[in-house]
Structures are given as structure tokens and as C-alpha cells.
């Protein structure tokens, strides 16, 4: 049974760095990719980036300069780090299991950027 | 980026048929997928690769299209279908439509 669960701080101060963890079960990170998608409150979905089964990464071009995605396969965890946070980065951040479509989603974690 | 355009909202009566459209700014082959999202929940995959029903999704949902024009159809609509529906393409870096909010009369 595929499961994903996001964790991280609910509140981040402007200009600081966001660190999120996605813990997965039911599949192997070395055989499947995990993506991050975010959703500002009341708005649509935005693809953030991905880590592929081989460990390579892809990022949304609008976020690329601030973003890093990595993983620890031994712990079945994927990490997202985004620096220089601004209020417009306030959103629910989801991690998802991807096979050309987002078949499974975590419940999401709300990140609020505020002083 | 491939831009996906959806109509913002629709209102239908239970038992009716509704079609939700999604137009891509460039061809995406058949790599268009549909999701349902209810308030406070994560998106749920309904249709993958334009016309394939995801596991556990009722056969009332169907998808069609290729290239740049795609449609999600619900027939018949039930009260529980009140939600926002998003299309998403994966021919290029993934992008989503802005969503169509379906309300029942």
C-alpha cells in the first residue's frame, strides 16, 4: 500500500529556509520518482520539482534558483529545501508518487511564511 | 511552460451529464490527466492518459481527447461530485489547469 506523509515546520519567517520531509512506504525510491506540488490557500496547483529513481532532479524554472530536492533511500525519505522564502510561498506542500501522473498523494502540510 | 486552460465554474443538477474542458497551449499527445479535489483534501486521480479510469473511480467518470483538447465527463452527476477538477499534462514539465469548480443546483 503506497503511502506518503509530509512533515515540517508550519511557520517560517520571511527570507528564511524551508525544510520539508516526505516519508514514503509501499514503494522504493530507487524504482520510482517523487514530486512536490504546492497549492496556495484557495488557489490552484503548482508543480515544484522532482527527484527521479536514479537520483537526478528537475525543478520548476520559476523556483530553480531557490530549490533543492534530495533523498535518503535507506530511510525512504525525500527532502525539499527552499531558501529566501516570501509570503507568496505560503501554501500547502504535497509530495506525490509519480508515474507520468500523480497516482498517490500525501495529505499535505501547510507552510505559512510570516514574521 | 505548457499552459492549460479550464473554464472556472459549472453548475449542474444531479442526474445530468456534465463535460469539463481543458485546452493545452501546445500538443501534449495523450499525456493529460484529471484530478478531483474536495476542500481540505489532497487531489485524487480520476483519469490518466486522457481516457483511462484510475483504480476505484466510478465508471460515471470518463475522459476523452488528444493533442490540445481534452474533456472530462461525469454522467450522471451525483451530489458527492461537488468538487474542483484539475487537468494536468506530463508531456513536458508537469503543469496544471487552474481548476473547474463544479457546483450542484
Image (spheres, helix red, strand yellow):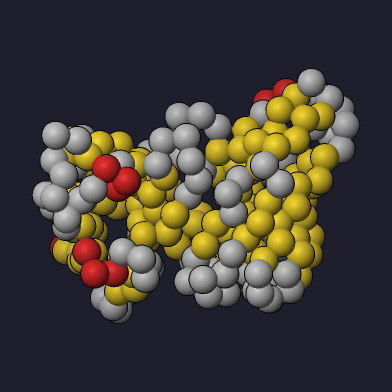
Say left or right for A70 vs B33: left
Residue A76, image quadrant:
bottom left
Rendered location of residue B14, percent (x, y):
82, 24
Rendered location of residue A63, percent (x, y):
31, 64
Rendered location of residue A41, percent (x, y):
41, 35
Q: Residue at x 57, y 74 (%)?
A: B91
Split into 4 quadrants, where in the image is the C terminus of chain B? top right
Say left or right for B83 vs B41: right
Can I make out residue A5 in this image?
no
Can I make out residue B99 in this image?
yes
B13 or A2: nearer the viewer? B13
Rendered location of residue B52, percent (x, y):
70, 59
Residue B79, image quadrant:
top right
Count of labels shown?
A: 0
B100 shown above or below B32? above
Say left or right for B48 vs B78: left
Q: Residue at x 73, y 69 (%)?
A: B68
Q: Residue at x 30, y 41 (%)?
A: A90
Say left or right for B46 vs B79: left
Q: Residue at x 74, y 73 (%)?
A: B67
Residue A27, image quadrant:
bottom left
Amino acid at each position: 500500500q503506497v503511502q506518503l506523509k509530509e512533515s515540517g515546520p508550519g511557520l517560517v519567517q520571511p527570507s528564511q529556509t524551508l525544510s520539508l520531509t516526505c516519508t514514503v512506504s509501499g514503494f522504493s525510491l530507487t524504482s520510482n520518482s517523487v514530486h512536490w506540488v504546492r497549492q496556495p490557500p484557495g488557489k490552484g496547483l503548482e508543480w515544484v520539482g522532482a527527484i527521479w529513481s536514479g537520483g537526478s532532479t528537475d525543478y520548476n524554472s520559476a523556483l530553480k534558483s531557490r530549490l533543492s530536492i534530495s533523498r535518503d533511500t535507506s530511510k525512504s525519505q525525500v527532502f525539499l529545501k527552499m531558501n529566501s522564502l516570501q509570503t507568496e510561498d505560503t501554501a500547502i506542500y504535497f509530495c506525490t508518487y509519480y508515474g507520468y501522473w500523480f497516482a498517490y498523494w500525501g495529505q499535505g502540510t501547510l507552510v505559512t511564511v510570516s514574521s | 511552460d505548457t499552459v492549460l486552460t479550464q473554464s472556472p465554474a459549472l453548475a449542474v443538477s444531479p442526474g445530468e451529464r456534465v463535460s469539463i474542458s481543458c485546452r493545452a497551449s501546445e500538443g501534449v499527445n495523450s499525456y493529460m490527466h484529471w484530478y478531483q479535489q474536495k476542500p481540505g483534501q489532497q487531489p485524487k486521480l480520476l483519469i490518466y492518459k486522457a481516457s483511462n479510469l484510475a483504480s476505484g473511480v466510478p465508471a460515471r467518470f470518463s475522459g476523452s481527447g488528444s493533442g490540445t483538447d481534452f474533456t472530462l465527463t461525469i454522467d450522471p452527476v451525483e451530489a458527492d461530485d461537488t468538487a474542483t477538477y484539475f487537468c494536468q499534462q506530463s508531456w513536458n514539465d508537469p503543469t496544471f489547469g487552474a481548476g473547474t469548480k463544479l457546483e450542484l443546483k
